[in-house]
Structures are given as C-alpha cells and as structure tokens.
Image (cartoon, helix red, strand yellow):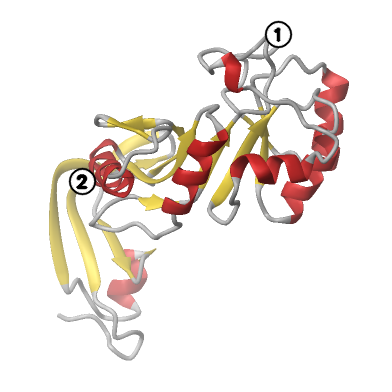
Amino acid sequence: MPSNKSVSDAPIVQFTNCRILRDHQLQREDLWVREGKILNPEKLFFDEKGSADVQLDCKDSVIAPGFIDVQINGGFGVDFSLATDDFKSGIDLVSQKILSHGVTSFCPTLVTSPSSVYHQVLPQISVRNGGAHGAGILGAHLEGPFISKEKKGAHPEHCLRTFEAGAFQDLLATYGCLDCVQIVTLAPEMRRSSEVIRELTKRGICVSLGHSVANLSQAEEAVQHGATFITHLFNAMLP
C-alpha cells in the first residue's frame, strides 16, 4: 500500500536490516523517514494507512547522527594550512572522503600561519551544505596565531602574535577576511583579548579558548565577554 498522499506527497523511505542506538544500546529495528524526519511506524500504519515508497537494505549497518568535526587540519594528503593552487580541489577531496568515517559536516582548521596564508586560503573556503557528494562545510576554524607561546604545541613560534593597540583591527589585518570564519581559537589571558572576543561574538563567530595559560578567573572573564567553546580540553592548557 503506498503512503497516504493526503498527509504528504513526500515519499516514505524504510531503512531495513539496520541497527539503531536506542536506550544506550544498539537495537535491530527498521527506520522510517519522510522529508528528513523519523516517523512513528504505528501512526503510519494505523492512522495514515500507508507504508514505504522506497526500501533500503542497510546490510547490518548502524544508523546514527553524523559526526561534526570542528577541528580538522586536513586529511587524505591535504593540509588546510598550505596555500596551494589546488586548495579548492583538496577541500573537496576531504569533504568526499570524510563521509565514509561518519562525518557529515566539518570546519577546515588552519593552525598558526603567516598572514599571507590566511589571505590566500580563507577566500577559498565557503560554507555549503552536505549531501551524497560530500560532507558539509560549516566555515573555517582559525586556531591561532593569537595563542600562548608557553602552550604553542606544534604551532610555529615565529608566527605567533599578540594583540596590538588596535586589537580587533590587528586581527582583521592578520586574517584579511572573516566572511567564512566560524570559530577562532585564542588565549584569553592575552592583553586586549576581551575586546576581540566581544567583536567576534557580535559577528556571530564562535570564540574558543585554547593553547592557553589562563587561570580560572581569566577564563571566566572570557566567557562573560562571549567565549563559548574550548579547543581540545585539557590539552595545551593549565591543569
């Protein structure tokens, strides 16, 4: 019996032979979906008097929400911090390949780099939806260069920067473009960081604390000014 078109013209897809996470356990159940929303099969059968328009055999695969990778520096031979002529094809490759690892959207992440790299790379990153062609791009994550020298990790020390008198204008000059930026990781103990956090937050950019020697009060102050995230918690920061 076809689906009840009086309820919706959209086709109903039935995923069979699959495992679904329910009540903290993987359970074998069919999954019914219409227009991207999971259906209650009882209501479908008894209220709509309908059934699936399409059946897909999942071959014992797990159906679960996709992963969102907010800090990925590259992959599959591609480095997002290298300003190459084929940068766009590289980001397309990562977008395609990462789907098989369960990632459905991601933030291409640049580590601390010379200003010239940001100016060349950032205009080539654009937000886009995901699909069968590849994972969606949520926007760039800029991890540095406004981070602590003491907690720089693998970031090149000669590229680290502090906020000068202009603070936010200094950040703009460093990055060149914020149109595609979703996250900025910075060390909140740096002078003038509060002004920068406020300005980034006003623009809808998530401020993440990381690579930092900030104490608790400095971190709390950053949160009060708009910081909402932490980059690799407990790694490259004080205990």
List the single residue furthest toward the front.
Answer: 116
Residues packed near mark 2 inside 10 Å, few (<14), some (14 to 19) or many (20 plus): some
Q: Earlier in the sequence, mark 1 or mark 2?
A: 2
- Please tell me whether mark 2 sits on a helix, a strand or a loop: strand
- Please tell me whether mark 1 sits on a helix, a strand or a loop: loop
Q: Which mark is residue 239?
A: 1
At 21% across and 62% down in the image, what residue appears?
14
At 24% across and 54% down in the image, what residue appears?
30
Answer yes or no: is residue 97 visible.
yes
| Lateral position of residue 141 relative to residue 149, left or right | left
As drawn, 41 above or below 114: below
Q: Mark 2 points at which residue?
A: 18
At 77% across and 43% down in the image, what residue appears?
168
Image quadrant for the C terminus?
A: top right
Residue in the foreground of this view, choosing between 93 and 167? 167
The picture quadrant where one finds residue 38 is: bottom left
Residue in the foreground of this view, choosing between 196 and 123? 123
**Disc 1 versus disc 2: nearer the observer:** 1
| Lateral position of residue 48 relative to residue 215, left or right | left
Image quadrant for the N terminus?
A: bottom left
Residues packed near mark 1 inside 10 Å, few (<14), some (14 to 19) or many (20 plus): few
- Residue 141 screen position, x and y as percent: 53, 40
Answer yes or no: is residue 226 visible.
no
Residue type for callout 2: Cys
As drawn, 175 above or below 221: below
The Cα–Cα distance between marks 1 and 2, rounded to whole angstroms, is: 43 Å
- Residue 217 screen position, x and y as percent: 88, 22
The picture quadrant where one finds residue 163 is: top right
- Residue 28 screen position, x and y as percent: 24, 43
Residue type for callout 1: Pro
